[in-house]
Image (tube, grey):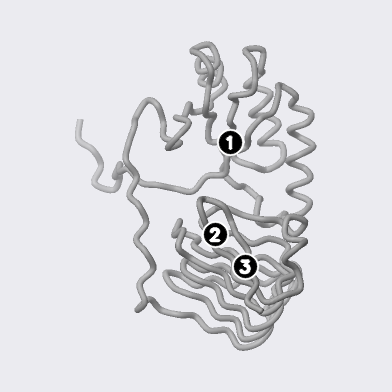
Amino acid sequence: MQTSPDIEFKGTGFTLTVIKLGSNSLDALQNILMDKIAKAPHFFNCAPVVVDVSQADDELDFVQLKEVVEGQDFVPVGVTACRNQQQKDSARSAGLAVMTAGALQSESRPANPPTPAPQSANSATKVVHGHVRSGQQVYADSGDLVIVGSVSNGAEVIADGDIHIYGALRGRAIAGAKGIKQAKIFCQDLQAELVSIAGTYLLNEQMVESLARASLVHIEQDKLVIRSLA
Protein backbone atom coordinates (compact mmCIF):
# COMPACT_ATOMS: atom_id res chain seq x y z
CA MET A 1 0.00 0.00 0.00
CA GLN A 2 1.42 3.39 -1.01
CA THR A 3 1.56 6.29 1.43
CA SER A 4 -0.10 9.49 0.28
CA PRO A 5 2.49 12.16 -0.59
CA ASP A 6 0.25 14.66 1.24
CA ILE A 7 0.76 12.90 4.58
CA GLU A 8 4.05 12.85 6.46
CA PHE A 9 4.92 11.25 9.80
CA LYS A 10 7.83 12.76 11.71
CA GLY A 11 9.03 13.15 15.28
CA THR A 12 8.95 16.54 16.93
CA GLY A 13 8.89 18.15 20.36
CA PHE A 14 6.11 20.19 21.98
CA THR A 15 5.82 21.89 25.37
CA LEU A 16 3.08 20.29 27.48
CA THR A 17 1.71 21.24 30.88
CA VAL A 18 1.82 18.43 33.47
CA ILE A 19 -0.93 18.23 36.11
CA LYS A 20 0.18 16.18 39.12
CA LEU A 21 -2.59 14.48 41.05
CA GLY A 22 -2.07 14.43 44.82
CA SER A 23 -4.70 11.72 45.32
CA ASN A 24 -7.63 9.99 43.62
CA SER A 25 -9.91 12.96 44.35
CA LEU A 26 -11.24 14.12 40.98
CA ASP A 27 -13.47 16.67 42.72
CA ALA A 28 -10.31 18.36 44.02
CA LEU A 29 -8.82 18.24 40.53
CA GLN A 30 -11.92 19.87 39.04
CA ASN A 31 -11.84 22.68 41.62
CA ILE A 32 -8.15 23.36 40.92
CA LEU A 33 -8.71 23.45 37.16
CA MET A 34 -11.67 25.81 37.56
CA ASP A 35 -9.54 28.10 39.72
CA LYS A 36 -6.71 28.16 37.17
CA ILE A 37 -9.09 28.94 34.31
CA ALA A 38 -10.72 31.76 36.29
CA LYS A 39 -7.31 33.40 36.76
CA ALA A 40 -6.02 33.00 33.19
CA PRO A 41 -8.88 31.90 30.89
CA HIS A 42 -7.24 32.63 27.54
CA PHE A 43 -3.93 30.99 28.46
CA PHE A 44 -5.50 27.68 29.49
CA ASN A 45 -8.28 27.47 26.89
CA CYS A 46 -7.84 24.17 24.98
CA ALA A 47 -4.36 23.75 26.52
CA PRO A 48 -2.90 20.25 25.99
CA VAL A 49 -2.03 18.58 29.31
CA VAL A 50 -0.49 15.39 30.63
CA VAL A 51 -1.65 14.05 34.02
CA ASP A 52 0.94 12.68 36.45
CA VAL A 53 -0.75 9.79 38.32
CA SER A 54 2.21 8.75 40.48
CA GLN A 55 0.31 9.61 43.69
CA ALA A 56 -2.93 7.92 42.62
CA ASP A 57 -3.78 4.31 43.46
CA ASP A 58 -5.22 1.55 41.29
CA GLU A 59 -8.81 2.65 42.02
CA LEU A 60 -8.41 5.83 39.94
CA ASP A 61 -11.17 6.08 37.33
CA PHE A 62 -9.33 7.11 34.15
CA VAL A 63 -12.54 7.58 32.16
CA GLN A 64 -13.83 10.05 34.74
CA LEU A 65 -10.38 11.67 34.93
CA LYS A 66 -10.52 12.34 31.19
CA GLU A 67 -14.07 13.72 31.47
CA VAL A 68 -13.08 16.11 34.29
CA VAL A 69 -10.11 17.50 32.35
CA GLU A 70 -12.12 17.85 29.13
CA GLY A 71 -15.00 19.40 31.06
CA GLN A 72 -12.80 22.39 31.92
CA ASP A 73 -11.78 22.84 28.24
CA PHE A 74 -8.31 21.36 28.64
CA VAL A 75 -7.18 18.73 26.13
CA PRO A 76 -5.94 15.56 27.91
CA VAL A 77 -3.11 14.15 25.81
CA GLY A 78 -2.22 11.31 28.15
CA VAL A 79 -0.89 10.26 31.54
CA THR A 80 2.59 9.80 32.93
CA ALA A 81 4.25 8.03 35.90
CA CYS A 82 1.89 5.05 35.95
CA ARG A 83 2.84 2.80 38.86
CA ASN A 84 1.96 -0.54 37.28
CA GLN A 85 0.57 -2.29 34.23
CA GLN A 86 -3.00 -2.08 35.54
CA GLN A 87 -2.87 1.72 35.50
CA LYS A 88 -1.38 1.71 32.01
CA ASP A 89 -4.09 -0.61 30.69
CA SER A 90 -6.84 1.45 32.34
CA ALA A 91 -5.45 4.67 30.87
CA ARG A 92 -5.26 3.22 27.36
CA SER A 93 -8.79 1.83 27.67
CA ALA A 94 -9.95 5.36 28.48
CA GLY A 95 -8.33 6.63 25.29
CA LEU A 96 -5.31 8.25 26.97
CA ALA A 97 -1.73 7.89 25.78
CA VAL A 98 0.77 6.49 28.28
CA MET A 99 3.86 8.70 28.46
CA THR A 100 7.27 8.21 30.03
CA ALA A 101 7.84 10.24 33.18
CA GLY A 102 11.01 11.93 32.01
CA ALA A 103 10.70 12.97 28.39
CA LEU A 104 6.88 12.76 28.17
CA GLN A 105 7.12 10.61 25.07
CA SER A 106 4.75 7.82 24.11
CA GLU A 107 5.89 4.46 25.48
CA SER A 108 4.73 2.78 22.28
CA ARG A 109 6.93 4.94 20.07
CA PRO A 110 9.94 6.52 21.83
CA ALA A 111 11.68 9.38 20.06
CA ASN A 112 14.32 12.01 20.63
CA PRO A 113 12.68 15.39 20.03
CA PRO A 114 14.99 18.07 18.67
CA THR A 115 16.22 20.76 21.04
CA PRO A 116 15.01 24.21 19.91
CA ALA A 117 17.82 26.34 18.57
CA PRO A 118 18.76 29.48 20.52
CA GLN A 119 17.21 32.66 19.14
CA SER A 120 19.47 34.28 16.59
CA ALA A 121 20.59 37.86 17.08
CA ASN A 122 19.51 38.46 13.45
CA SER A 123 15.93 37.35 14.01
CA ALA A 124 13.29 39.88 13.10
CA THR A 125 12.09 42.13 15.92
CA LYS A 126 8.48 43.31 15.99
CA VAL A 127 8.02 46.79 17.48
CA VAL A 128 4.62 48.08 18.62
CA HIS A 129 4.27 51.78 19.47
CA GLY A 130 1.39 52.38 21.86
CA HIS A 131 -0.58 50.44 24.44
CA VAL A 132 -1.88 46.89 23.90
CA ARG A 133 -5.52 47.08 24.98
CA SER A 134 -7.68 44.52 26.77
CA GLY A 135 -8.75 41.74 24.40
CA GLN A 136 -5.88 42.38 21.97
CA GLN A 137 -3.15 39.85 21.20
CA VAL A 138 0.23 40.67 19.63
CA TYR A 139 2.52 37.90 18.38
CA ALA A 140 6.12 38.15 17.17
CA ASP A 141 6.74 35.11 14.96
CA SER A 142 10.35 33.83 15.03
CA GLY A 143 11.70 36.91 16.77
CA ASP A 144 11.59 39.36 19.66
CA LEU A 145 8.72 41.67 20.58
CA VAL A 146 9.14 45.27 21.76
CA ILE A 147 6.16 47.15 23.19
CA VAL A 148 6.75 50.90 23.52
CA GLY A 149 3.84 51.32 25.89
CA SER A 150 1.90 49.25 28.40
CA VAL A 151 0.02 45.93 28.19
CA SER A 152 -3.45 46.21 29.73
CA ASN A 153 -5.32 43.64 31.83
CA GLY A 154 -6.88 41.09 29.49
CA ALA A 155 -4.30 41.72 26.75
CA GLU A 156 -1.74 39.15 25.63
CA VAL A 157 1.73 39.58 24.10
CA ILE A 158 3.54 36.55 22.69
CA ALA A 159 6.98 36.11 21.12
CA ASP A 160 9.09 33.21 20.00
CA GLY A 161 12.06 35.19 21.35
CA ASP A 162 12.34 37.87 24.06
CA ILE A 163 9.69 40.39 25.11
CA HIS A 164 10.59 43.98 26.04
CA ILE A 165 7.86 46.17 27.52
CA TYR A 166 8.67 49.86 28.05
CA GLY A 167 5.71 50.42 30.32
CA ALA A 168 3.50 48.43 32.68
CA LEU A 169 2.76 44.77 32.09
CA ARG A 170 -0.72 44.13 33.48
CA GLY A 171 -1.90 41.43 31.08
CA ARG A 172 -0.15 38.24 29.97
CA ALA A 173 3.32 37.89 28.47
CA ILE A 174 4.45 34.62 26.85
CA ALA A 175 8.07 34.46 25.64
CA GLY A 176 9.88 31.51 24.07
CA ALA A 177 6.55 30.39 22.64
CA LYS A 178 8.16 27.67 20.52
CA GLY A 179 10.09 26.21 23.45
CA ILE A 180 13.18 28.43 23.60
CA LYS A 181 14.13 28.37 27.28
CA GLN A 182 16.76 31.10 26.81
CA ALA A 183 14.02 33.65 26.12
CA LYS A 184 13.45 36.49 28.59
CA ILE A 185 10.79 39.03 29.52
CA PHE A 186 11.76 42.60 30.44
CA CYS A 187 9.29 45.18 31.72
CA GLN A 188 9.35 48.54 33.48
CA ASP A 189 6.44 47.78 35.83
CA LEU A 190 5.49 44.17 36.58
CA GLN A 191 1.80 43.74 37.45
CA ALA A 192 1.13 40.78 35.18
CA GLU A 193 -1.79 38.37 35.22
CA LEU A 194 0.60 35.72 33.94
CA VAL A 195 4.18 35.43 32.66
CA SER A 196 5.40 32.37 30.78
CA ILE A 197 8.62 31.21 29.13
CA ALA A 198 8.72 27.99 27.09
CA GLY A 199 5.61 26.68 28.84
CA THR A 200 6.78 27.42 32.40
CA TYR A 201 4.52 30.04 33.94
CA LEU A 202 3.72 32.09 37.04
CA LEU A 203 0.35 33.61 37.93
CA ASN A 204 -0.14 37.00 39.55
CA GLU A 205 -0.47 35.68 43.12
CA GLN A 206 2.88 33.89 42.72
CA MET A 207 4.64 37.18 41.92
CA VAL A 208 3.53 39.23 44.94
CA GLU A 209 7.06 40.05 46.10
CA SER A 210 8.09 41.19 42.61
CA LEU A 211 5.12 43.35 41.63
CA ALA A 212 5.25 47.07 40.80
CA ARG A 213 8.91 47.22 39.85
CA ALA A 214 11.13 46.96 36.79
CA SER A 215 11.80 43.25 36.30
CA LEU A 216 13.56 40.57 34.29
CA VAL A 217 11.83 37.20 34.00
CA HIS A 218 13.88 34.19 32.89
CA ILE A 219 14.33 30.46 33.44
CA GLU A 220 16.96 29.34 35.92
CA GLN A 221 17.39 25.65 36.80
CA ASP A 222 14.04 24.85 35.13
CA LYS A 223 12.19 27.41 37.25
CA LEU A 224 10.84 30.83 36.35
CA VAL A 225 12.81 33.49 38.22
CA ILE A 226 12.00 37.21 38.55
CA ARG A 227 14.86 39.63 39.17
CA SER A 228 14.61 43.35 39.87
CA LEU A 229 16.13 45.71 37.31
CA ALA A 230 16.07 48.64 39.75
The C terminus - image quarter: bottom right
CA gap, disc 2 to disc 3? 15 Å
Q: Which residue is mark 2?
A: 197
Task: Looking at the picture, tell me which residue is in the foreground, 131 or 101.
Answer: 101
Q: Residue at x 67, y 65 (%)?
A: 172
Q: Where is residue 34 shown, x and y percent of the image?
A: 77, 43
Q: Disc 1 or disc 3, which is closer to the eye?
A: 3
On the image, numbered disc 1 is attached to which residue? 76
At 71% from the left and 24% from the top, the residue drawn is: 23
Q: Secondary structure at mark 1?
A: strand
Residue 14 % position (x, y) = 45, 48
Q: Position of residue 209 (x, y in %)?
A: 76, 63
- Is residue 155 shown above or below 3? below
Mark 2 or mark 3: name the one nearer the start of the chain.
2
Q: Which amino acid lies under the numbered mark 2 shown in the image of this protein?
A: Ile
Q: Is residue 35 left or right of residue 125?
A: right
Q: Earlier in the sequence, mark 1 or mark 3?
A: 1
Quarter of the figure that contains the N terminus? top left
Q: Amino acid at mark 1?
A: Pro
Q: Residues within 10 Å of mark 2 (few under 14, many from 20)?
A: many
Give the x, y percent position of residue 39.
Answer: 77, 54
Q: Which mark is residue 227?
A: 3
Residue projecting furthest to the bottom: 129
Nearer mark to the viewer, of 2 and 1: 2
In percent of the image, x 59 and y 32: which residue is there? 51
Residue 65 left/right relative to 177: right
